[in-house]
Amino acid sequence: MSATENIRNFSIIAHIDHGKSTLADRLIQICGGLSQREMREQVLDSMDIERERGITIKAQTVRLNYRAKDGKDYILNLMDTPGHVDFSYEVSRSLAACEGSLLVVDASQGVEAQTLANVYKALDSNHEIIPILNKIDLPAAEPERIRRQIEDVIGLDASGAILVSAKTGEGVDEVLEALVTQLPAPQGDASKPLAALLVDSWYDPYLGVIILVRIVDGVLKKGQTIRMMSSGREHLVEQVGVFTPKLKRVDALGPGEVGYLTAAIKEVAHTRVGDTLTDAKKPAAKPLPGFQPVQSVVFCGLYPVDTSDYEHLKVSLGKLKLNDASFEYAPETSMALGSGFRCGFLGMLHLEIIQERLSREFDLDLITTAPSVIYKVHMTSGEVKELHNPADLPEVTRIKKIDEPWIRATILVPDEYLGAILKLCEDRRGVQVDLTYAGSRAMVVYDLPLNEVVYDFYDRLKSLSRGYASFDYTIEEYREGNLVRMSILVNGEPVDALSMMIHRSKAEARGRALCAKLKELIPRALFKIPIQAALGGKVIARETLSAMRKDVTAKCYGGDFTRKRKLLDKQKKGKARMRTFGKVSIPQEAFIAALKMDQD
Amino acid sequence: MTVQENHLSLYVHWPFCEAKCPYCDFNSHVRERVDTGAYRKALLAELDFFAELTKGKRLTSIFFGGGTPSLMPPEIVAAVIEKAKEFWDLSSNIEITLEANPGSSEAKKFAAFRTAGVNRLSLGVQSFDDQALKFLGRIHNAQEAEAAIEIARDTFPRFSFDLIYALPGQTNQAWREELGTALTLAQGHLSLYQLTLERDTAFYRQHRRGKFFLPREEEAADLFTLTREVCEQAGLKAYETSNFAVPGEESRHNLNYWQGGCYVGIGPGAHSRIFADGAWRAVSTLKIPEQWLEKVEQNGAGLAEDVLLTARQRGEEIVMTALRLKDGLDKKNFARNSGIPLKNLINQDALDALKEQNLVVESETRLAATRDGALLVNAILGELLA
């Protein structure tokens, strides 16, 4: 246990690519957390996907030992927070475990929307914030301009901002010194009952679930029986330790300290981020503030391309769930795609991460249906049903109205792209809330229906602004929407996997685009195939795929049938990847491509 | 026309060419020098090997293919025919075909081939347009081709020639005219192939790089039906996808392949289907001439593969080739020939649908593609068998 006055807990707030991980690496290096041999670029992002995408999915932490200029030894706990809008709740919990933040801004790029959102979250947690202008070694760096921008946009005093190049190491010493002198020491009382904030948890095959905690009051030690205050579950603590960043056992963790515990817990789902851990024998009177149960906001179906992979998918989802309590899944069956799972995610990035991990770590070939949000269907009977899958929409005559979730989006964009971004938001049924300028950048706040955002809003935003727009959102409320279910019929047969909830005003254009796309994707058959989009019984768009006219090999090679055999084998293989609707076979590739379709 | 089980066809492959044509992916090779003596010996040795496996059959056709078999010394052709007479009972009306290039040097050898016993010549004319011949990488010109046809007509009782159509930029009208020329020169048989790009050919690579464009499916379909109509008006029936003949003038050798008969192939990269001891044996030989030669010299045969076909495999082969024929499949003998009843092999629902779409017709005795179905045989096979 360390005296609280020698502890500083901090996180780093930065936009992707602004150098958070590189700065963290420098800090670890200087404080001798890892030997040169153990240093690997971006130590903290341990998953392949994290390293590739340059984002952090799991919160991580590292304890640094630092001897300051005042001659005293300090413990600096760096809390690395998840870096994406989908994980804003997790971010808020990580921030709640610290007293201050380093605000890292790229001195050539400036403040981004996501940075802004996280700074506000840090201010909500009463953080002391130390602005840092990174990448000052770059020729394009304009520290003065960006310093002003921080003041204009965030309203933070940036006069004392530290100029740093995490790459060369310049200014990093100053950062360490500022942590000691500018951040407050944590407060807490070791004699009070244990109250520890559960910041994050993950599964380790040898130790079971590892829980990352910040001790607020009391003491955590081995052999103690702890209780999770949200669920009442109790566990015997097996190991207590800190991250150097390697796991290192300690005897006990006291107030202000950050560390881990293991307690033979088998499922991450039993350890909820934001929960309070207390001593079962001497429990705290009330939990720490801010706990929220996880809630999925985006849903989609995941199906194996090869139907025989269903069991493999099921087992793989189970394994992923062990380590990620924030997604949920339940079996579902589609006429089009066979057996699969309806899965819920924190957001689009979360969906992509799970999908990518399934294909990469479990070698699964998957079809993902169009992402959908939760609609609240008000029935004429007065009942309100939650709709996760368009296929489950009750009969229209029994529906009084349908509500859909809205978000409030904050977008920061260089003003040359502003027009395009405003148009995008308007096209997506957005309602402008605010528009302000800071230098050459605009900050736009829009209320948007989530179902317009889950689709490809983020990709469009990036491409319309050449990557310069940044985006953050919070879930707002449910509002009534003029929503309909659009069905796609191929040769008269509805293809359930392609049906979607859509605003009536958008149905026709979307239906036309989807029919046209399917016409390209479905191979011609021996007969002509109508492809229709319909609302209820009313067809709103139609294409006809004409029948194949010629498909015959010119030359049959004497007595050598190898070629004919190869063709037949190819046809057989192709059929295994097709789904049949009435008389039409649709290749899996068509579903994948149709669901990926650009909206314009 | 039905298959006779005790009948046998013999194929002889001569793998050498003077130049490789850019569309061709046959087993053909260009060599500065060929030791014809060694190949003569090896062909006769392999003939010996296969004769042993097919004793007692009646030989109904011989086909010298390639490569360019007209580059063979006529003496080797004669020796193979003579040797075949020793092994098998030769049908009285045996058909002996040789493929030839219509170049002037080859035409000089026609008489010697005739003397050796060849009674049907198949000329690789490919086009009557010098521009097209150049595109196709042929080393002869249209004038030489017409001259070779004249000599073939005077020398052999039967002859046929090949043309390639659906060339880049070829209009319906241009092809109709060229086909008209062909029909005035033909004598009862023509092979008319749409240009197809096979992998690992120069054309395939050039096409991928966008050097030329082929007709689209619609245009190709129109050319196909135009070809069939023009030939039929001249009395030549489309008895196979790309083969046209006055009734009785069909290539009996090829029909034997397509109807599921027994055949032996000698020379590099040749294929055999032999019915022996109650099972169908599929034998093929090494494709590279030198490797084949070495193996024959060591073992008496240059085998690459020698496997027994399952009844299903055999059945599929027959369906795949027979549906390309105008007369289609002989249902009566199918189960006996392949070892599997037709109904166990094909998808009945698919067949019903195809009949309803008027792409396939079925009678008591035959199953065949209709005139519309003839353009779609690959897709039909995919439905029936895949």
Image (spheres, rainbow, N blue to C red):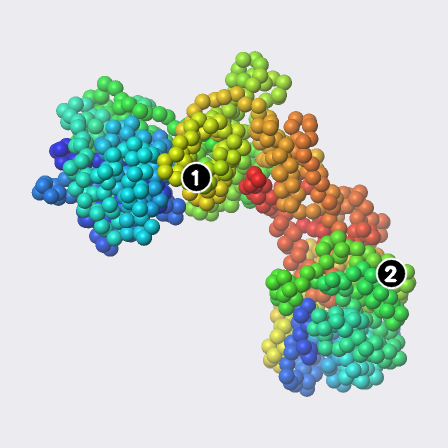
Give coordinates of residue A330: x percent, y percent.
48, 31
Side of B6 relative to A347 (left or right): right
Looking at the rendered structure, the secondary structure element under dot 2 is helix
A168 shown above or below A182: below
Of residue A119 and residue A578, the one placed in the foreground of this image is A119
Quarter of image, res B294? bottom right
Give coordinates of residue B76: x percent, y percent.
74, 83
Give coordinates of residue A161: x percent, y percent.
24, 40
Amino acid type of the residue tagged 2 in the rendering: Val
B260 shown above or below A342: below
Quadrant (top left, top right, bottom left, bottom right) of the C terminus of chain A: top right
**Residue under mark 1: which chain is it in?**
A
> Which residue shows up at 17% across the image and 28% down it?
A187
Whether residue B364 is visible here, answered yes or no, is: yes
Q: Are marks 2 and 1 in contact (CB under 8 Å)?
A: no
- Residue A415, numbered circle: 1
Amino acid type of the residue tagged 1 in the rendering: Asp
Quarter of image, res B236? bottom right
Side of A398 relative to B120 (left or right): left
Of residue B152 and residue A57, the one placed in the foreground of this image is A57
Asked if marks 2 and 1 fall on the same chain, the answer is no
Label 1 environment density (alpha carbons within 10 Å; few <14, some 14–19, many ≥20): some
Looking at the rendered structure, the secondary structure element under dot 1 is helix
Q: CA distance from mark 2 to mark 1?
A: 68 Å
Residue underneath mark 2: B230
Of residue B331 and residue B88, the one placed in the foreground of this image is B331
> Which residue shows up at 26% across the image and 42% down it?
A132
Quarter of image, res A209? top left
**Residue under mark 2: which chain is it in?**
B
